[in-house]
Amino acid sequence: MEKGNGWIVLILFIVLIMVALGRFGRWLEKPPKRRLPVPAAGDIPQTDVVELLEGAGFDVLAGKTKLPITIAVNGEATLASQLYIDYLAAREEKLYVVRLARERVPIDWAAGSSVREKLLPYSLIYPETEGVLYVDMEQRKIKIITFQIEV
């Protein structure tokens, strides 16, 4: 190696170390992603809903799951609530949250705001899901709802 090449290699090595340390520092400052664990499959009773989902090619992975929610208002008052997921299902390696149609909670399919208010929380609770399966047992139909949020 010539005399000047050693300095070039040393400078490149120092620049590489500085870039690596900068990236490591940014990685350390990032808050960790909190993800809810996907519920493990337990005993899933064979119901009409499960049969409809399996008939449409879905594998039912988990039954009814209760997710407790704690709500703080201005950091003081604490409210308790829960979100219920009826089932988790998968097809072609895509995971879906299943929500059953309920007479007392109708969805206006012509209004995007109605669909968003009723189903978006279910899609956001597990980021790895592809979307929500809305199962209407009266009509024996499954609707696949996906959300794309543009920021």
Image (cartoon, rainbow, N blue to C red):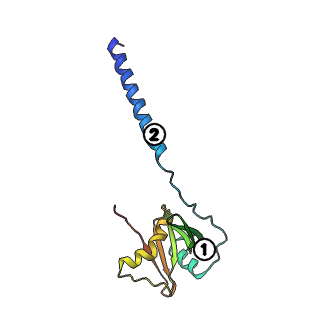
Residue 104 on image: x %, y % = 50, 87
Which residue in the rendered view is the most extreme toward the right? 43
Residue 40 on image: x %, y % = 62, 64
Between 68 and 55, which is closer to the camera in this rendering? 68
Q: Nearer the viewer, mark 2 or mark 1?
A: 2
Can you say which quadrant of the picture contains the N terminus?
Answer: top left
In this view of the protein, can residue 2 be seen by the observer? no
**Residue 109's disc number:** none
Which residue corresponds to the image point at 37% horizontal and 64% vertical from the top-left? 149
Can you say which quadrant of the picture contains the C terminus?
Answer: bottom left
Residue bearing the label numbered 2: 25
When the figure is inspected, residue 150 is found, relative to residue 120, above or below; the finding is above
Residue 58 on image: x %, y % = 52, 71
Between 84 and 62, which is closer to the camera in this rendering? 84
Q: Earlier in the sequence, mark 2 or mark 1?
A: 2
Which residue in the rendered view is the most extreme toward the left? 4
Which residue corresponds to the image point at 39% horizontal and 21% vertical from the top-left? 10
Judging from the image, what secondary structure is the residue with disc 1 in? loop
Between 114 and 137, which is closer to the camera in this rendering? 114
**Residue 64's disc number:** 1
Amino acid type of the residue tagged 2 in the rendering:
Gly
